[in-house]
Every structure is written in C-alpha cells, then in structure tokens.
Amino acid sequence: MNNSKKYESDVVIAGGGLAGLTTAYELLDHDKKILILEKGIQQDLGGQAKESFGGVHMIGTPHQKRLKIKDTPELAYRDWTTVAGFGGQDRWPMAWARFYCENSKEYIFDFLDSKKISFLPILNWAERGLHKPGNTVPRWHVIWGTGNELIEKLLLAIEAHPNRANLEILFGHDVSGFEIEQGRVTGIHGKIIDNGIDFRATASCVVIASGGICGGDLTKLRENWYKDWGTPPRKILNGGFPYSDGKLHDQARSAGANVTHLDKQWHYAAGVHHPRKRRPDDGLSLVPPRSALWMNACGERIGPIPLVSNTDGRFLVETITRQPGQYSWQILNWKIAAKELAVSGSDYMTAFRTKNKRLLVQNMLFGNHHLVERLVRECPEDFVVADSLSELMDKMDERSIEGYKINREQFEKDIREYDDQITRGRSFHNDEQLRWISTFRKYRGDKIRVCDFQKILDRKAFPLIAIREFILSRKSLGGIQTDLQSRVLRGDGSVIPGLYAVGEAAGFGGGGIHGLGALEGTFLGSCVLTGRVAGRTIAGA
C-alpha cells in the first residue's frame, strides 16, 4: 500500500459499539495498548446501543431479590433453550447461552453497576411466550437514562481509566479486510473515508466488533431471509445500525472463519417510518399497545390467535409476513395510546432518557399524551386519527399499499365484537387478547402500563387511531462462530490465531447464542458479556 497510513497496537478493534467499547475497557484494565477503528463519526460511538431503550436481561440481580422474584440460572437456561430451539450442531451457541445465564450477575450487572449505571426499581416482563414458555419471571432491567446513559457512563469510565492513554479511537475508517501472515491474523486494512487514503493497522490480536447484517441496504438480510417465513416483504423498514452491512462477515469467511445461522434474524412487527429519514425506509420501532387490535392490510383482525405484544415477538413477525400485503394496522383510541404506546428507542422516551422522575410518574398516572401527539405529528404517513370509524377507514384506504382496501363490514364487526366482550363483564371474557390483558395486569410492573379492559369505540376515549406498521429489521442472531474465549473458529472447530469476535458480529456469542428467538435484553447483555470475555482472553494470552 503506497502512501498508506500505518498504525500499530497490541489490539485493534473493528467497531466502536457497545461490544467494542466493553472489550477496550477490559483491555485497559490489563494495561494493553488498544486501537478502535470506527467507520462512523464521533457521535456514532456506542452504535445502536446508544439509541436503544436500554433493557438488559439479567439473572439473580439485587433488583430481582428485592422484588422477591425467584430466579435461578437453571430456570433462565431452560427458558432460553425453549425459545431458542437449538439443534444438534449448536454446541457453541448452547455453551454461550448457559454461560450467559450462569454469569450475567458478575459479567454484566456488576460491570454496569461499577460504572454507576442504574436501573429502574421495577423490572419489565418481556417475551413471556405464547405457544411455549418464554421468560418465566421478569428479567428485563431498564437502564435509568436509556441506552444513551449506558454509553455515556461507559465512555466516562473509559476517560477516567488510569490507562486511558493506551487507547486511541479513530473515526471515518472503513475496515475492508484482514492482514494474515502464516495463518495468523496480524492486522486489518481499509480506507479512510474523508480522503480515500488506504490504511493498515497491525496488532497481535484483532477483534471484530462491526455488528451484524441487518443494517446497511438490507441486501444480506434479504439474501439470508428465513426460508420457513416465505418471501420477505417488499417493504421492510430499516431499524438496524447503518454500518451493520456484513462486510467483515464475508472477510472473516474468506479467512476461514465459520459463519453460521445468518438466517436467524430478530425483527420487530411494529415499525413506522422514521421522521429523520437518515436513509431509505428508515424505521422507528414502536412498543405496540397490548389493548390495541391488530389487523391485516384488509382491516381484518389477525387470528385465530390474536396478536398481542410482550408474548412472542418472533410469532408476531412470522404471522404478519403471511398476511395480505405483509404489513399490518393496529386499531386503538387516544386513551389506549397515551397509556400503553411506547417507542423502542431513547430519543422518544423523554422521561426515561432525561431521568425526569416527576415526568415519568405523571406519564404513568395520566398518560404520555406528549409522545402520542409527537408521533401523530411527526409520522403522518403511518398514524391516522379520526372521530368515527367511517373516517378512520377512509384515511386508512388512502394509505393502502398495492391496492389493499379495508374490508369495512368485517373491520367494524371485529371491533364491535371485541368491545361487546368487555361490555359483558370480566366473568364472561372469552377473547384470548382479553385473557392476556388480565394476565398482564396481575404483575404490578405491567398493571400501571396496561389499560383496564378499554373498549375501542368508547367515545370518552376518542379520537380513534390507526397505526400502519411494517416489519422492521433489527438484529442478526447468527454470525461469526466463537468459542467460550471469544476466539474465532474455523469450520473444523480449530481456532484462527489472533482473531476474535464480539457482540452481534459473533451472533452475540458462538455464532448464534439465541437460536431462533430472543428473550429481549439479551442483545445489550451479550455485547457486554462477549466483550469482557474477549478482553480477559486476550490479556491472558
């Protein structure tokens, strides 16, 4: 490489997301010289974790014990494997899943707690399961300050580290491949985006922390779409990190790495167009209200099993991909939206992000009307507001895709039948969604966030709202296979010397720690876990 820029370090990390930053911090503890090469600008440091709601899946924490939640690593692992559906070839994913369940307190909670990262006192109970058990007990710890706080506190800890001078972070560096000598990875190379100059970074160890395949232009996502789901939707909103394009997955495979389970992907069912439009079909992920009715593109209630969030996210996505148009509508009213609607991202969850306790309590008691107003104002192509069913259907038809129109008779029938169930009284509820609402409200963490059997056509709760929702890309559950030391493995199980992978690039551990489905909060948790393991392994090596 003539006129190229050259760097040298003990360890070079490709990617400055949560997993890469955690790896770097662990290496600073062991007095290593580290170079992080980030493709984005300084504001991108922290990756998608910075934009997240900030939920972390953990077992045996002080929060669980204080709430008298009886949890054990054995129970957590049983829940994990039930959802994962591991196969006979999933040795390393299973090993990583067990390691997570047995060590989340030490490797994740204690690490975050030492960085002065705090959590809400009440745990959320996500992914309870539908056809089979999910989380038997609440394990979703929400960071007070969201993912933004997580990254800010981690960066502050890095800056305050006594060995901070050992770490260099460079931005605008697009890594495109690995340097290999006699079978050992000795560095990485690529281009500096601003000036097009080639660079080469040499090191004794290289860590891939570049994310998954569910961002970028979604080409790899579509190429690896899960076959049992049929054809991928024509419109998928992009909710992955922009630089998660899978480029280093390809380069790792060329270097002999075993890349597995790329068809295992975790998407969300309730995506709307992002107001910022940072890229084509940029998406914003909603946390769907549990009291809303989920309809297909024709305005027919999806069933026979009604779709309800916080049960089985994978089932929601799979079911919608089999519906006409492969997109959906959620039907609700303003009261339900103010009580239950949330966004899976830090920017919109103002009370959480700013750590405003007074505003949080106000929103819980009286509803987050500001959030609903903001979404209606900023997402007009997907949010419809009306004062009658007829007006609502007219506006929904205006937003139809590929000619799908609302089946008006069935639409009104489904809504009125649901409301009639509520009118007859709780003793006579015979609708599966109402049974789920009853179950949700038995847990105090959900009772304040779920309406008490709210009818849709209640004039006191008007106006009506319809939300057009698309499948939104999020995470790759598969990736570069690693052993329990975060070392990258070849197809025959042997180690590629000098090469490590962490976070989403590694399928969050082992090339697919989640199997088919995730229990939520395991993404951030796995980034911390694999990063710490890689740092300790490299330091020991």
Image (tube, grey):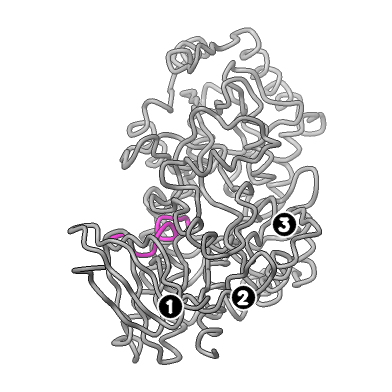
User: Residue at the location (64% across, 53% down)?
Assistant: 261
User: Which residue is label 3 attached to?
Assistant: 135
CA gap, disc 3 and disc 2: 34 Å
The amino acid pointed to by label 2 is Val
Q: Amino acid at mark 1?
A: Thr
Q: Residue 272 lies in what quarter of the image? A: top left
Which residue is disc 2 drawn over? 495
* Magenta segment: 43-53
Pick whichever of labels 1 and 2 is earlier in the sequence.
1
Q: Is residue 415 above or below residue 408?
A: below
Could you tell me if residue 419 is visible in this image?
yes
Residue 326 inside the magenta-drawn segment: no
Q: Residue at x 60, y 50 (%)?
A: 262
Task: Give SS at disc 2.
Answer: strand
Among numbered discs 1 and 3, the one appearing first in the sequence: 3
Q: Give whichever of discs 3 and 2 has the lower sequence position.
A: 3
Q: What percent of the width, then of the height, locates residue 159? A: 31, 81
Along the line of sight, the residue nearer the viewer: 390 or 369: 390
Q: Please give the residue where the numbered disc 1 appears in the rendered image.
A: 186
Q: Position of residue 236 (x, y in %)?
A: 49, 34
Q: Does residue 464 sit above or below 541 in this rendering? A: above
Q: Is residue 375 above or below residue 392?
A: below
User: Residue at coordinates 69% horizontally, 47% vertically from top-left?
Assistant: 440
**Quadrant into which the C terminus falls:** bottom right
Q: Is residue 313 left or right of residue 14?
A: right
Q: Nearer the viewer, residue 98 or 55?
A: 98
User: Residue at the spot x=42%, y=39% of the render?
Assistant: 283
Give the CA separation, mark 1 to mark 2.
Answer: 14 Å
Q: CA distance from mark 1 to mark 3?
A: 42 Å
| Amino acid, disc 3 | Asn
Secondary element at image label 1: strand
